[in-house]
Amino acid sequence: MAKIIAITNQKGGVGKTTTTVNLGACLATLGKKVLLVDIDPQGNTTSGIGINKADVKYCIYDVLINEIDPKEAIVDTAIDNLSIIPATIQLAGAEIELVPTISREIRLKKSLQQIKHLYDYILIDCPPSLGILTVNSLTASDSVIIPIQCEYYALEGLSQLLNTVRLVQKHLNTSLQIEGVLLTMFDARTNLGIQVIEEVKKYFQQKVYRTIIPRNVRLSEAPSHGQAIITYDPKSKGAEVYLELAKEVVSVE
Ligand code: ADP
Ligand code: MG
């Protein structure tokens, strides 16, 4: 049975998509069967792993709104053991279309239950909001990974996120856990980065991953080539740290 992990933070640009793609690819490289679920209408995980959106037959929208068999929406990637349920811009309407529907918060959970047995990990890339798509993701998940960018306002907005996690735990998914907090885009040349690390560790304590993701230009280039870092530049620092993170994630199995 897969462990389902939502990669979530309602702030944009903190490294959710980069982490979903690269943690997923590294877990697959370690021999785990991995499914990525792109639930962000921007579809950056979809294009970032090399799926041409014009070729997508069924996307996560069809799973959530039209309730198609989720197996129909799974697409293989160029990496062994790594598949994806893609997102296209169609998903932008889902936030509103889901509002009047029955059991709107548990749509994703019900779908993933049908395919959970096929994988070791299912990673859900959440949109930059705390709306119904994120609530669906938290409801469907065993745990959450929260990426936090090492910058000045790092902790801002986290109380809303944690409040949403608590609400979901109370009403929709009592077993939801915090898997880990991941520090991203660390720049060793600044004191600020070090201060942020200390602040985040004080707040989240042992939940913070030992692996810290530095700024690495190869990580930002890889998506435009439709590749995870592990295939785009396997010798880069970015590949090294995401592999380290994958090992850390596996070590708590
Ligand atoms: P989110 O999904 O939270 O919006 P992204 O993963 O898309 O964030 O990252 C935002 C931008 O920063 C993207 O252009 C991405 O390529 C870049 N980026 C993410 N992580 C790193 C990193 N460690 N080093 C350099 N650039 C990064
Ligand atoms: Mg993203």
Image (spheres, rainbow, N blue to C red):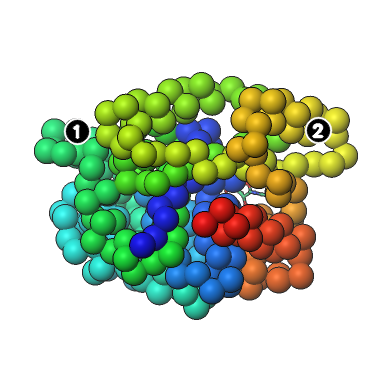
Res 152 quadrant in image:
top right
Give left or right: position of 72 versus 177: left
Question: In the image, which is nearer the foreground, mark 2 or mark 1?
Answer: 2
Q: What is the quadrant of residue 249 in the picture?
A: bottom right
143 over 216 or under it: above or below: above
Position in image of residue 160 (x %, y %): 46, 22
Q: Secondary structure at mark 2?
A: helix
The residue to which callout 2 is attached is 194
What amino acid is found at the position of numbered circle 1 in the picture? Val
User: How busy is the neighbourhood of tag 2: few (under 14 within 10 Å), some, or many (20 plus)?
Assistant: some
Residue in front for this viewpoint, 88 or 125 = 125
Rendered location of residue 46, percent (x, y): 44, 60
Q: Is residue 194 above or below residue 108?
A: above
Inspect the image, locate mark 2, and give the three-letter code of the amino acid beneath it: Ile
- Observer-nearest residue: 240 or 208? 208
Front residue of 222/250: it is 250
* SS of the residue under disc 1: loop
Say if disc 2 is inside 8 Å of ligand 1: no
Precedes in sequence: disc 2 or disc 1? 1
- Determine whether, in the image, residue 7 is placed left or right of residue 99: right
Q: Position of residue 65 (x, y in %)?
A: 19, 49
Residue named by callout 1: 99
* Vertical comparison of 10 with 49: above or below: above
From mark 2 to mark 1, how far is it between C-alphas? 42 Å
Residue shown at 69% from the left, 63% from the top: 239
